[in-house]
Image (spheres, helix red, strand yellow):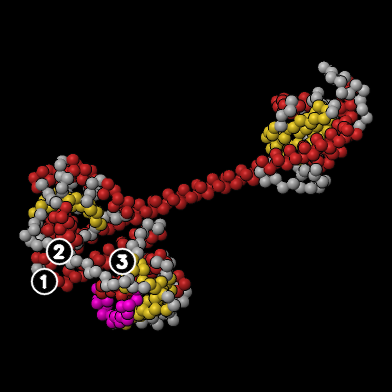
C-alpha cells in the first residue's frame, strides 16, 4: 500500500498498469480484512437469487470500512483519482486531486449513479468499463476529458457480501505532450538526416560531373602534346612541356577534389601490404619532380632502405607528394627541401622540411582543414584549392598514423612530420615484377574510337595510327555501329556520355551484334567506383578515366591481344 505523499515513478504505460494493479490488490486485501471485522449479517451464507435491500446496505457499510484506505491511495498519487462503485453503478468513494481538477468532487459524485455524474457518450463508456469490471475483468483505457489525457484502470472488488468495482485514474497529459514532442523531435532529426544525405548525394553527383567536365578537355590537350612529340616536331618543345605540365597540374587538382569526397565518405579502399618506405617516397618524388625542376629547388633525401611500413603504396606516395608539392609551391625558387625518415619507438617518422614562406601562427592550427590556404598573392598562382594537406591528413589517419605541422612563423620555413606504425620486412627477397611488354609496330590492331568530343577522338586516333594501328573514328552510337560493321574492331574505346545512344547502350548493341571477342574499354570522365561497376556490368572489359595518355592506350591494346 502506498504511503500518503509517496510519488511512484512511472515511466511507461506498462509500469502505470502494474502500479495500479498493485494498489488495487492492496485495496482488495484491506477491504476483505475490513469485511471480516464487521458483525455478521442475518442470513449471511445463504444463497439468494436477489440480494435484499438490507444486504446492499451491508455492502455499502463494508465498503465504507475501507473508505480511508481508498482516499489515502488517491491522495498519494500526484494527478490521480480513485472511484469505487457498487453493483448498481453508484459511486461509493470518489477521491483525488485529479477529480477536482477536471470538475468533479466527492460531494457531487458519492451516492449518485454514474450516468448522473458523467453525461453523454463519456458516461456510457464509463458505465461499460465499470460493468466489465463488475463482471470480473480488468482493463485499462485512455480517454480525453476537457483537454486532459486520462489513463484509467478498472478492476473488480470481491469479498463476502461485496460486489463492487474500482477505477484508478491518472493524468498523463504532460507525459503525452512529452512523448509527442519527442516524436516530433525524432521525426525532425530523421528529416534533417535525409536532407543531409540528399545534400551529400547532390554534392557527390556534382563532383562527379565536375570531374567529367574538367577531364574531357584535358584528354585532347595531353594527346595533342603526345602526337606532336611522336611526329618529331620539336620546334616548340618548350611550349609542349609547359602545356603538358599545366595539364597534369589540372588533373592533380581534379583528383584531389574527388579524392577528398571519396575519403570523407569512406569509399577509398586501401590495399595494405608490407612495403619499404623508400618506395613510397621515391614515387612521390617522381610525381613532384616537374615542379621541383621548374622552381630549381634542391631536394635532399635521407630515407633508409630498411624502414618498412604496412600500407597502400600508392596512397602513401600521394601523401608525401602532397607534402612535397606544398613545400615546393610555397618555397621561393632555388630553395632547399629535405625529406628525412627515422625509426622511433615502434614508429617511423618522416619529416618534410623547407626554408620557404612558413606558416602564420593563426593559420597553423587550421592548416589541415579543407580549403584553408595561406597568403594568396599573385606569385602564389599554383597554390591549389587547399585540399592537399587535408587529404594527406585523412590518408595518414587511415593508415593508423598522424601528421603535424610546425613553423616558426612567416618567412622561416615549415616542417611537416608524418608518423606511421613501423613493421618488420617480409622474409626473403621480394620477387621483381616482370617488365611490361611494349607493343611493336608489327602488332597492329583494328581499333574503333568513339567520342562526341571530336578533338579528343581525332587526336587519340592519330596517336594510335602513329603506332601502326588501323583506326576508325565515330562521334555517336549509330555511326559507331556502322563503323564496326566495316572495321570488325578488335578493340573499341567508347566514351560513355554520347549523344543519341550512350556508351552503355552502345556496348550492349555491339555485344548483341556478335562482337563478344572485341575488347571494350569505357573511356570516361566519370571515375567513381559506382561508374566502374556499372561499366563492367554493361559488358565492358575495362574502365579508364580521362585523360588517358597514349602509353596507357597502348597497354590496353596489348591486353586486347591477350583477350583475343
Q: Earlier in the sequence, mark 2 or mark 1?
A: 1
**Where does residue 28 sit, x and y in percent of width and height?**
80, 35
Question: Is residue 221 depicted above or below 296 in this figure?
Answer: above
Name the secondary structure under disc 3: helix
**Residue annotated with mark 2:** 437
**Residue annotated with mark 1:** 235
Question: How far, Cα to Cα, is label 3 from label 2?
Answer: 22 Å
- Residue at (86, 31) in percent of width and height: 63
Q: Earlier in the sequence, mark 3 or mark 2?
A: 3
Which corner quadrant holds the N terminus?
Answer: top right
In this picture, residue 560 sits left or right of residue 208: left
Name the secondary structure under disc 1: helix
Label ID, residue 314: 3
Question: How far, Cα to Cα, is label 1 from label 3?
Answer: 36 Å
Which of these two is toward me, 534 or 118?
Answer: 534
**Where does residue 419 sit, x and y in percent of width and height?**
41, 73
Amino acid at each position: 500500500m502506498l504511503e500518503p505523499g509517496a510519488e511512484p515513478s512511472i515511466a511507461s504505460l506498462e509500469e502505470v498498469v502494474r502500479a495500479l494493479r498493485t494498489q488495487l490488490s492492496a485495496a482488495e486485501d484491506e477491504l476483505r480484512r475490513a469485511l471480516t471485522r464487521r458483525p455478521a449479517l442475518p442470513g449471511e451464507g445463504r444463497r439468494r437469487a436477489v440480494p435484499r435491500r438490507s444486504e446492499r446496505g451491508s455492502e455499502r457499510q463494508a465498503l465504507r470500512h475501507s473508505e480511508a484506505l481508498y482516499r489515502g491511495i488517491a491522495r498519494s498519487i500526484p494527478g490521480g483519482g480513485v472511484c469505487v462503485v457498487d453493483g448498481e453503478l453508484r459511486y461509493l468513494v470518489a477521491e483525488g486531486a485529479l477529480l477536482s481538477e477536471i470538475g468533479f468532487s466527492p460531494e457531487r459524485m458519492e451516492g449518485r449513479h454514474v450516468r448522473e455524474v458523467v453525461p453523454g457518450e463519456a458516461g456510457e463508456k464509463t458505465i461499460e468499463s465499470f460493468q466489465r469490471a463488475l463482471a470480473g475483468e480488468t482493463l485499462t483505457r485512455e480517454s480525453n476529458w476537457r483537454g486532459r489525457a486520462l489513463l484509467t484502470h478498472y478492476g473488480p472488488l470481491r469479498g463476502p457480501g461485496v460486489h463492487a468495482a474500482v477505477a484508478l485514474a491518472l493524468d498523463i497529459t504532460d507525459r503525452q505532450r512529452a512523448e509527442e514532442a519527442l516524436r516530433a523531435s525524432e521525426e525532425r532529426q530523421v528529416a534533417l538526416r535525409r536532407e543531409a544525405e540528399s545534400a551529400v548525394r547532390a554534392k557527390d553527383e556534382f563532383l562527379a560531373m565536375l570531374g567529367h567536365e574538367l577531364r574531357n578537355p584535358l584528354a585532347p590537350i595531353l594527346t595533342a602534346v603526345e602526337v606532336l612529340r611522336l611526329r618529331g616536331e620539336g620546334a616548340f618543345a618548350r611550349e609542349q612541356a609547359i602545356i603538358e605540365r599545366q595539364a597534369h597540374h589540372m588533373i592533380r587538382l581534379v583528383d584531389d577534389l574527388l579524392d577528398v569526397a571519396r575519403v570523407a565518405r569512406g569509399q577509398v579502399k586501401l590495399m595494405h601490404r608490407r612495403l619499404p618506405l623508400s618506395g613510397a617516397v621515391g614515387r612521390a618524388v617522381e610525381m613532384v619532380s616537374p615542379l621541383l625542376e621548374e622552381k630549381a629547388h634542391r631536394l635532399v633525401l635521407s630515407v633508409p632502405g630498411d624502414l618498412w611500413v604496412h600500407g597502400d603504396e600508392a596512397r602513401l606516395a600521394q601523401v608525401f607528394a602532397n607534402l612535397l608539392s606544398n613545400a615546393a609551391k610555397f618555397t621561393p625558387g632555388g630553395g632547399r627541401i629535405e625529406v628525412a625518415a627515422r625509426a622511433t619507438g615502434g614508429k617511423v617518422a618522416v619529416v618534410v622540411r623547407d626554408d620557404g614562406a612558413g606558416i602564420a601562427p593563426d593559420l597553423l592550427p587550421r592548416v589541415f582543414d579543407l580549403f584553408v590556404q595561406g597568403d594568396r598573392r599573385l606569385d602564389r598562382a599554383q597554390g591549389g584549392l587547399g585540399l592537399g594537406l587535408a587529404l594527406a591528413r585523412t590518408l595518414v589517419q587511415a593508415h593508423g598514423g598522424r601528421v603535424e605541422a610546425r613553423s616558426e612563423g612567416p618567412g622561416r620555413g615549415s616542417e611537416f612530420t608524418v608518423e606511421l606504425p613501423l613493421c618488420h620486412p617480409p622474409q626473403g627477397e621480394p620477387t621483381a615484377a616482370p617488365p611490361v611488354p611494349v607493343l611493336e609496330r608489327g602488332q597492329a590492331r583494328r581499333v574503333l574510337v568513339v567520342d562526341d568530343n571530336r578533338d579528343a577522338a581525332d587526336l587519340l586516333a592519330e596517336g594510335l595510327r602513329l603506332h601502326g594501328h588501323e583506326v576508325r573514328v565515330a562521334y555517336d552510337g549509330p555511326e559507331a555501329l556502322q563503323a564496326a560493321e566495316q572495321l570488325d574492331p578488335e578493340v573499341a574505346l567508347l566514351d560513355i556520355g554520347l549523344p543519341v545512344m550512350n556508351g552503355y547502350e552502345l556496348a550492349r548493341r555491339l555485344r548483341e551484334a556478335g562482337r563478344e571477342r572485341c575488347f571494350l574499354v569505357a573511356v570516361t570522365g566519370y571515375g567513381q567506383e559506382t561508374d566502374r561497376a556499372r561499366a563492367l556490368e554493361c559488358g565492358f572489359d575495362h574502365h579508364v578515366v580521362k585523360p588517358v595518355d597514349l602509353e596507357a592506350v597502348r597497354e590496353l591494346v596489348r591486353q586486347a591481344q591477350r583477350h583475343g
